[in-house]
Amino acid sequence: VLQAKLFASIFKSVRHDKSLTKSIADRVALLTYGCINLSIMALMKTLDLFAKERGVVLREQMRSSYSSLEYLLAKVFAEMPLDASFALIFASVLKKLTGLRSSMGTLMKTYCLMTISSVSLGFAIGSIASTAETAMALGVPVLVILMVVGVINPSGVNTD
């Protein structure tokens, strides 16, 4: 909630009463920073927890308590709803405080999808990292590379 309020106060030109043409760049920046913010928070939380639990999980798997798939499914069902709820709250507060022209549903779905994607990336990186420190060190650079590569051709149109 505080981050959404902070973003709304930074991007004061994004309001219902302001001209749409004068605030297009700020609207794009607001949406982008929101996605980046939620993505990094979800990724870092997942990496921290997933990597720290690695030793316990390995010990319990040696005792045949559960398989890797069972552990991963339990993590997904336990953590993704919480992560998604943060994204939904963030999107709803941001929508109410700013003049974003997208529907509430579209904004919530977009932020929720970004958050869940980052959690999934955190699971992938956390599973290959040997320590929590290694996972944390790998997480943000990988996310930044994916963000940069993802915006090279956002239209998806072949430029040839």
Image (cartoon, rainbow, N blue to C red):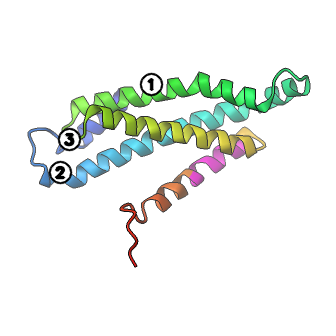
Residue at the spot x=13%, y=54% of the render?
A: 21
**Label 2 crowd (10 A; few <14 / some 14-19 / many >=20):** some
Residue bearing the label numbered 3: 101
Q: Given contact means CB atoms under 8 Å apart, are the residues at marks 2 and 3 in contact? A: no
59 left or right of 85 in image:
right
Residue bearing the label numbered 1: 85
Residue at the spot x=55%, y=51% of the render?
A: 143
Image: 14 above or below 108: below
Q: Between disc 1 and disc 2, whose residue precedes?
A: 2
Q: Amino acid at mark 3?
A: Arg
Q: Over which residues does the magenta segment extend?
A: 133-142
Q: Between disc 2 and disc 3, whose residue precedes?
A: 2
Secondary structure at badge 2 equals helix
Q: Return the x and y of residue 67 as percentages of the image width and height.
A: 81, 28
Secondary structure at badge 3 equals loop
Between marks 1 and 3, how big is the CA–CA gap? Answer: 22 Å
Q: Nearer the viewer, residue 75 or 96?
A: 75
Q: Amino acid at mark 1?
A: Ser
Q: Quadrant of the N terminus?
A: top left
